[in-house]
Image (tube, grey):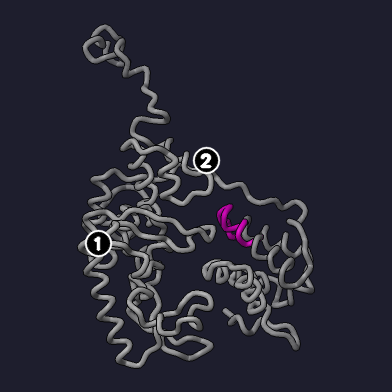
């Protein structure tokens, strides 16, 4: 795979660097920036390293068709690729274009989410340990996404109020959620471990954590404050590309994803379980407990309540608590003696 910096037009900066700069200016998240960079890089490689300015809508259409037909990517993946390319032409190359003719945003399938029962959740969690157990417990206990869990900082945790704050979640929105009472002790221990690691890194002469936006210029010492440390720091240090400073980032999402997948496989549940399954289970179990859907919507950070409504389809009592006619009084067990059953003579 060719490095990003090799994708340059003659006598111009890297098109991928220009893309990243334009996205940062518009306050896109770091994760979105990296995703868009990857899609543009794949698009350029697909067309033999030709500069995007030389390509037209037909080339976008050909690339998207390749993703759908040959790579068989999901609808959401195809839509993300198209969004990245349209952003490139509109904001970076100043050649705005609509979706290529014949290509419309792929319709996402409306799948009923996989939801685990409480005993199944307990079983999977029992097969995890350490930081992986604590992160997975927050996925279920607080309804967080995996990216939100790994990006928590110490200052986002309020043990006295038993709440946490998700900063710049999906849609760049902040929100609050509860901290389960049984996680108060483990979180206090995790924060103490972070403080010890911070002290060791500082003594070793490493740089502090990366701060958002221009906060590092306003308050450079904050990079070493306990409040700004990652709640789940990575084991390994990294060298910052532009400054060459040695820093510590938060744990990579893949570490938790692999741990959850392995634990679910060991639990032999017979279903595909991911980190997001915990979030689905959080929402469903709250609705089953009688909490109103607007409250669940706020906790999940959904923009529209229609997104939250999908969980009403997997409740134990069914949508709106409708009871099957087979369970009504006329078909109760004591009255079934006269019912002729297939195969019983």
Left or right of 185? Residue 225 is right
Identify the residue under disc 1: 128
Judge the density around disc 2: few (<14), some (14-19), many (≥20) Cα neighbours within 10 Å.
few
Q: Which mark is residue 175?
A: none
Q: Is residue 116 above or below residue 147?
A: above
The image position of residue 333, as x and y in percent, is 23, 15
| Residue visible at 29% across and 48% down in the picture | 269
From the viewer's side, name the closer residue of 112 and 71: 112
Secondary structure of residue under mark 1: loop
Q: Is residue 74 magenta?
A: yes
**Residue 328: % across, % down:** 32, 15
User: x, y percentage for residue 296?
Assistant: 41, 44
Q: Residue furthest top?
A: 338
| Residue 195 lies in the magenta stretch | no
Residue 303 higher or lower than 199, as above or below: above
User: Mark 2 and mark 1: span between their CA atoms?
Assistant: 33 Å
Which residue is found at the position 23% from the left and 67% from the top? Answer: 188
Q: Residue at x 72, y 63 (%)?
A: 60
Q: In which image quadrant can residue 17 be found?
A: bottom right
Q: Is residue 336 left or right of residue 112?
A: left
- Secondary structure of the residue carrying numbered label 2: helix
Taken as a whole, is the magenta stretch helix, strand or loop? Answer: helix
Disc count in the image? 2
Sequence-earlier tag: 2 or 1: 1
Q: Is residue 320 left or right of residue 341?
A: right
- Between 81 and 138, the residue placed more toward the observer is 138
Which residues, given as a range, are shown in magenta?
Answer: 70-82
Residue identified by numbered label 2: 306
Density class for disc 1 (Cα within 10 Å; few <14, some 14-19, many ≥20) is many
Q: Is residue 337 visible?
A: yes
The spot of residue 337 in percent (x, y) is: 23, 9
């Amino acid at each position: 795979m060719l490095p990003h910096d090799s994708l340059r037009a003659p006598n111009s900066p890297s098109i991928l660097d220009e893309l990243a700069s334009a996205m940062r200016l518009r306050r896109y998240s770091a994760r979105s920036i990296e995703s868009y960079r990857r899609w543009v890089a794949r698009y350029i490689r697909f067309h033999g390293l030709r500069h995007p300015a030389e390509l037209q809508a037909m080339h976008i259409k050909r690339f998207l068709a390749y993703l759908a037909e040959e790579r068989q990517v999901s609808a959401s993946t195809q839509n993300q690729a198209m969004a990245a390319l349209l952003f490139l032409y509109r904001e970076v190359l100043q050649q705005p274009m609509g979706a290529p003719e014949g290509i419309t945003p792929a319709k996402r399938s409306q799948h009923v989410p996989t939801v685990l029962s409480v005993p199944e959740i307990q079983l999977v969690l029992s097969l995890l340990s350490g930081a992986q157990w604590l992160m997975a417990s927050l996925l279920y206990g607080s309804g967080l996404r995996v990216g939100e869990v790994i990006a928590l900082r110490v200052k986002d945790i309020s043990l006295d109020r038993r709440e946490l704050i998700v900063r710049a979640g999906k849609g760049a929105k902040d929100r609050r959620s509860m901290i389960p009472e049984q996680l108060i002790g483990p979180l206090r221990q995790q924060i103490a471990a972070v403080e010890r690691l911070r002290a060791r890194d500082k003594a070793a002469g490493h740089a502090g954590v990366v701060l958002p936006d221009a906060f590092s210029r306003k308050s450079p010492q904050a990079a070493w404050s306990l409040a700004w440390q990652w709640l789940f720091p990575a084991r390994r240090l990294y060298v910052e590309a532009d400054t060459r400073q040695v820093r510590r980032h938060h744990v990579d999402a893949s570490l938790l994803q692999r741990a959850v997948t392995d634990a679910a496989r060991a639990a032999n549940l017979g279903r595909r379980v991911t980190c997001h399954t915990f979030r689905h289970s959080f929402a469903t179990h709250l609705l089953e407990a009688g909490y109103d859907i607007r409250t669940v919507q706020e906790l999940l950070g959904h923009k529209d309540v229609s997104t939250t409504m999908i969980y009403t389809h997997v409740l134990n009592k069914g949508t709106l608590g409708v009871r099957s006619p087979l369970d009504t009084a006329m078909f109760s067990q004591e009255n079934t003696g006269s019912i002729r059953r297939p195969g019983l003579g």
